[in-house]
Image (cartoon, rainbow, N blue to C red):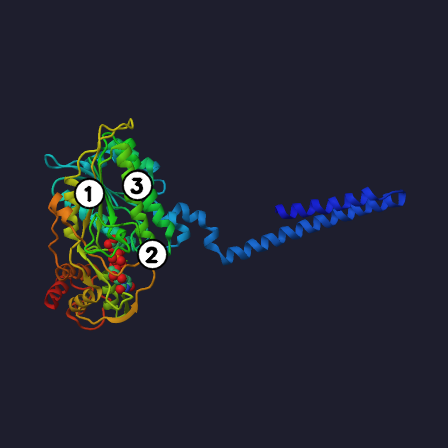
Amino acid sequence: MPSSGIIAVDAAAKGMKLERYASGGALLLRRATSAKLVSASSHLLFRATVLATLALVFLFTLHYPSLLSRSFHLSTGGGDAAHPSSASHRSLLMSSSSSSASAAYGGAAWEKEMRRSARPSRDGGISVLVTGAAGFVGTHCSLALKARGDGVVGLDNFNSYYDPSLKRARQALLASRGVAVLDADINDGLLLEKLFDVTAFTHVLHLAAQAGVRYAMEAPQTYVASNVAGLVSVFEVAAKHADPQPAVVWASSSSVYGLNTDAPFSEDHRTDRPASLYAATKKAGEAIAHTYNHIYGLSITGLRFFTVYGPWGRPDMAYFFFARSIVAGEPITLFRAADGSDARRDFTYIDDVVKGCLGALDTAGKSTGSKSGRKSGPAPLRVYNLGNTSPVPVTRMVAILEKLLGKKANKRIVTMPSNGDVPFTHANVSHAAHDFGYRPTTSLEAGLRHFVDWFVEYYKLDAKIAKGARGAAAKPAKKKKAAAAMSAAS
Ligand SMILES: O=C(O)[C@H]1O[C@H](OP(=O)(O)OP(=O)(O)OC[C@H]2O[C@@H](n3ccc(=O)[nH]c3=O)[C@H](O)[C@@H]2O)[C@H](O)[C@@H](O)[C@H]1O
């Protein structure tokens, strides 16, 4: 539209030029005719341009619907579970129902429910806001806190990075144990403020994040939005709005060690060479934590998780999607390091990690700041490895799965692509052991057995799979039969 307007003005200006250089009556007549002609042709030109523009918009809509509907994604979320679009990265932040959560939540009944869920049932119990509560680690930690008599309010945006129905099932499990999980986003600062107005949480267990090392190449902005902006949002509310300030324990990652080759990885080692954007955002989080501790006296503990696995786990992680592929008879790709060695991971079982999280909460120490922005003295700033201390080759992990599922994997072994992966991880956990008695006790064999038990039951796999027979049947399994078959197979 504007371009056609410019063309019309240009044509009229040319007519005026003729007028300026002509002289005499005949020429006056020609000038008038010329002006009419110019006017008519500029109308034609204008109409043609409008039509052409409309045609272009139509074609553009046909070919790039996602671009034109971007504003829809920004506010309503959605996307394909397997490949959420990076253009709709804010949909990973704000699910459809959570985009206006701060406006939707409130009222006497809501406040009563928040207070009920946040209230400890034991003397000396703590009251914890768990972000990412419908996530893997968040669910297990919330259950453990509630079970020992602490108060818990959960928050999750139920994004589609992986199957949201699994997150809803975890939410239902939490609800059955009396833990309310709000459908809301950590970037919704107003909602967080509202929550702290209603409940004086003593602690925040901040686990909401965009996880996954390799997916960061596909959707970089989601990592910045959740792991940097979201973290700041949580720290802002905890530091400047909450009264009194809570202590914050949050999920960093073993990936911050990046290209570090000293092993086992110790908290004193270099973390300035992240291999992925995921790792870089977690490293940035640790720097941001330092700032909020330094300025506002916020007690902050970062936990570097090492490839956590177990029942109710994350379907985007290798052990989980390998199990699925083995059952389905589909090929799996195993990465081998450039020197020809198998990739190795310090796989850490969820129950061990939960003990570490609760230990970190229990020893967090108080924040020293207040709403006024003044702090009364230095507050704790801590970082701990939560690993298993015994790296296992990924090929061994697959061999265990094959045994448990009673079925051979169709393996394809390739050199590790340059996608942010690291060849090995190995935790030194002496600081966590010293400060809160963290001692991982679960072998990969035992932990994967628990995972497979849950996996077979949750997905109602045919008992034949558990027995090692071929093919997964579509019809629902009898749970007891499947479980019995699983223990027979192991
Ligand atoms: O500790 C962490 O900080 C991170 O742990 C997890 O990352 P990773 O340790 O990379 O786990 P995961 O993807 O399960 O790959 C496991 C192994 O399988 C190998 N791997 C992977 C995929 C594949 O197709 N083939 C393969 O061999 C791969 O080379 C690797 O050796 C979390 O996802 C991450 O969110 C973060 O929490």
According to the picture, the residue beneath numbered tag 1 turns out to be 179
Whether residue 464 appears in this view of the structure is yes
Spatial CA distance of label 3 from label 2 is 23 Å
320 relative to 92, above or below: below
Q: Earlier in the sequence, mark 3 or mark 2?
A: 2
Please state the horizontal and vertical placement of residue 73, each as a whole percent of the image. Answer: 41, 49
According to the picture, the residue beneath numbered tag 2 turns out to be 215
Asked whether mark 3 lies closer than 8 Å to ligand 1, one says no
Q: Residue at x 35, y 36 (%)?
A: 103
| Amino acid residing under circle 2 | Tyr
Q: Residue at x 67, y 49 (%)?
A: 46
Spatial CA distance of label 3 from label 1 is 30 Å
Q: Quadrant of residue 32?
A: top right
According to the picture, the residue beneath numbered tag 3 turns out to be 288
216 relative to 400, above or below: above
155 relative to 111, above or below: below
Q: Nearer the viewer, residue 328 or 353?
A: 353
Asked whether mark 2 lies closer than 8 Å to ligand 1, one says no
457 relative to 140, above or below: below
Label 3 close to label 2 by CB (< 8 Å): no
| Amino acid residing under circle 3 | Ile
Label 3 close to label 1 by CB (< 8 Å): no
